[in-house]
Image: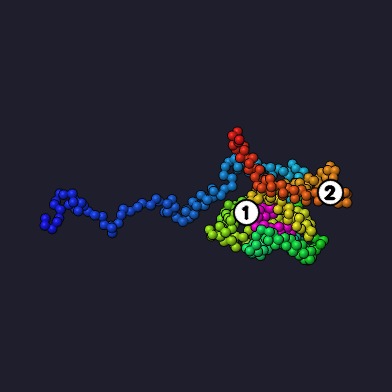
Amino acid sequence: MSDGAAPPGSPAATVDAAPRPSRAAPGPARSRPPSPFRRLPFAQRLTGLKTSYGKQLTIYQSGFGRFWLAVLVLLAATAPFILSDFWLSVLNFTAIAAIAAIGLNLLTGFTGQVSLGHAFFVGLGAYTAGYLGGDRGLPFLVWLPAAGLLGALVGLAIGPFALRLKGLYLAIVTIGLVFLGEHLFLNLRSITGGPQGRSIPSPEIGGLDFGKLGGLSRDQSFFFLAIPVLALATLFAKNVVRSRPGRAFQAIRDREVAAAVIGVNLARYKVSAFALSSFYAAAAGALYGSYLRYVTPEQFGLLFSIQFVAMIIVGGVGTIFGSILGALFIVLIPRLVEQFSDSIPFLSKTSSGGGLDVFTFNQLIFGVLIVVFLVAEPLGLAGIWQRIKVYFRAWPFSY
């Protein structure tokens, strides 16, 4: 005990005798929760991912929504046999305008890039359809996508201006496109026909002429083409805005600097937004010219661009459904004014008849609508519709 060791059985000896854990000794293995895709083959893992994401991207996830979709399809199929040619022409023009308005909303409403040059791309698509379908004799399934692709290529060339310009400066640049387009449409006589304009062929698919199907009128025949094209354009745009590019568009719109900080490629997505918007506008222009059968350069001026701006403001900026509602509203009002101009005392069909002519009155209506909706209802008709749905969902506890 001379060495100072503790006697056996004492507390100090018990503590000293206890085994000390070694730092080098490995601890107990931690169990990791098994992944549901760990031991599955790659093909099965890919199928599982597609299924899970596919459910999230389904537009109509409930049976109630699918029911109303079926009702809408049934109404569209029977409308040509119920409605008059006047209302069918309104719906045809609405479908064409809605396609172009969706394209503008993708650029302005979802990406925040102001554009007043939409009429240029619509005219470009119309004249492309006339040249490829009329002069070259190509079928509809060729000249329609070709018109859209040409518009997208021009949009790719214009898109880089959006990298340095924004707001009013970008709007001025796009206004310049309209005047440049008027100059080109007037002077490229071999393609556009000059000031006299040119004819556009009717769409034909597999021997079916949608300018005249059997014993149906032109408005009835074209309806069976315009509505399916609008449905495809709407479905594609709806999926774009819910995908990764769509989220990047909205991030750029909300806060450009923050989007760049989190890794959004501003150059790629701004140019892509211009290209996609131009594709929609040019494809709508091809349908527009084919429905009218004859176009002239003065149809694609600045006032035409303002009408598309009015569509997305009235319908709802940043909404696909609002683009369709705004197109219906803006197309319907001038037609109603023209239809009932004889019943309005201060209106005349021509400027020489005294009072306001129909054209000037329609422009005044567009201006008033833009101001009223910007001040009183920034969300447009789509916002009103959303509030109505919320009201009835919560009824009778809506208040």
Q: Mark 2 points at which residue?
A: 356
The residue lying at 83 percent from left, 49 percent from top is 357
Of badges 2 and 1, the one in the foreground is 2
> Which quadrant of the rendered structure holds the C terminus?
top right
> At 63% across and 56% down in the image, what residue appears?
112
Residue 156: % across, % down? 65, 63
Question: Which one is earlier in the sequence, the residue at label 2 or at label 1?
Answer: 1
Residue 82 image position (x, y, % from top left) = 74, 41
Question: Which residue type does callout 1 highlight?
Answer: Phe
Q: Which image quadrant: the N terminus?
A: bottom left
Residue 229 in sight: no
The kind of secondary structure element at disc 1 is loop
**Position of residue 237 measured from the top left corner of the image (x, y, whole percent):** 63, 53
Magenta part mainly helix, strand or loop?
A: helix
Magenta stretch in the rendered image: 96-123
Q: In this view, does 144 lie to the left or right of 3?
A: right
Which residue does the image show at 60% across and 53% down from the upper left? 241
Magenta region includes residue 256: no
